Amino acid sequence: MRGCLVTTRQIKAARALLAWSQADLANRSGISEPTVARLESADGEVGGREDTAQRMRAAIEAAGVDFIDENGGGPGVRLRKPTKDKSRK
């Protein structure tokens, strides 16, 4: 997993790409739904404990979303291209 800096807007955008509710993210990251809601209610960098942001990011990345770091164009997220399974030829 790359750097831990993640914004609440990235988390919300990633959930939208995955069609996940806050409950889905909570279940997949092992974080309570009220905690997800509380963290998403503030703008800016995800607050709370550092491992909480890492767990949320890890769950989202495992589902196929890449986090795009600030590179002059602003931070973001995008769906990862599906990998072709070469064993299915």
Image (tube, grey):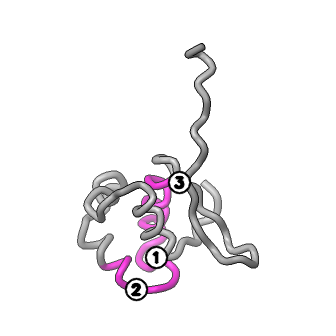
- Of all residues shown, which one is farthest toward the right? 72
Which residue: 52% across, 76% down? 7
How far from the left and from the top, in percent, is residue 76? 59, 69
Compared with residue 44, is residue 2 higher up or lower down, i.e. above or below?
above
Residue 86: quadrant of the picture: top right
The mark that comes first in sequence, 2 or 1, is: 1
N-terminal of the two: label 3 or label 1? Answer: 1
At label 3, the amino acid type is Val
Q: Residue furthest bottom?
A: 43
Q: Tell me the distance, in whole angstroms, between the alpha carbons under discs 2 and 1.
A: 7 Å
> What distance separates the C-alpha of mark 3 from that of mark 1?
15 Å
Is 57 positioned to the left or the right of 85 in the image?
left
| Residue at disc 3, secondary structure | strand
Q: Position of residue 84 (x, y in %)?
A: 61, 29
Foreground residue among 64 and 42: 64
At 58% from the left and 48% from the top, the residue drawn is 80
Q: Residue at x 60, y 13 (%)?
A: 89
Residue occupying image coordinates x 48% and y 47%: 62
Disc 2 to disc 3, how far (Cα)?
Answer: 22 Å
Under mark 2, the amino acid is Ala
Q: How many C-alpha atoms fall within 10 Å of the one at disc 1: few (<14), some, or many (≥20)?
A: some
Secondary element at tag 2: loop
Disc 2 and disc 1 in contact, CB within 8 angstroms: yes
* Amino acid type of the residue tagged 1 in the rendering: Thr
Q: Quadrant of residue 37?
A: bottom left
Q: Which residue is mark 1?
A: 8
Q: Earlier in the sequence, mark 2 or mark 3?
A: 2
Q: Which residues are magenta?
A: 38-60
Residue to which mark 2 is pinned: 42
Can you identify the residue that label 3 sits on?
65
- By secondary structure, the bulk of the magenta-drawn segment is best described as helix
For the residue pair 23 and 85, the one nearer the viewer reads as: 85
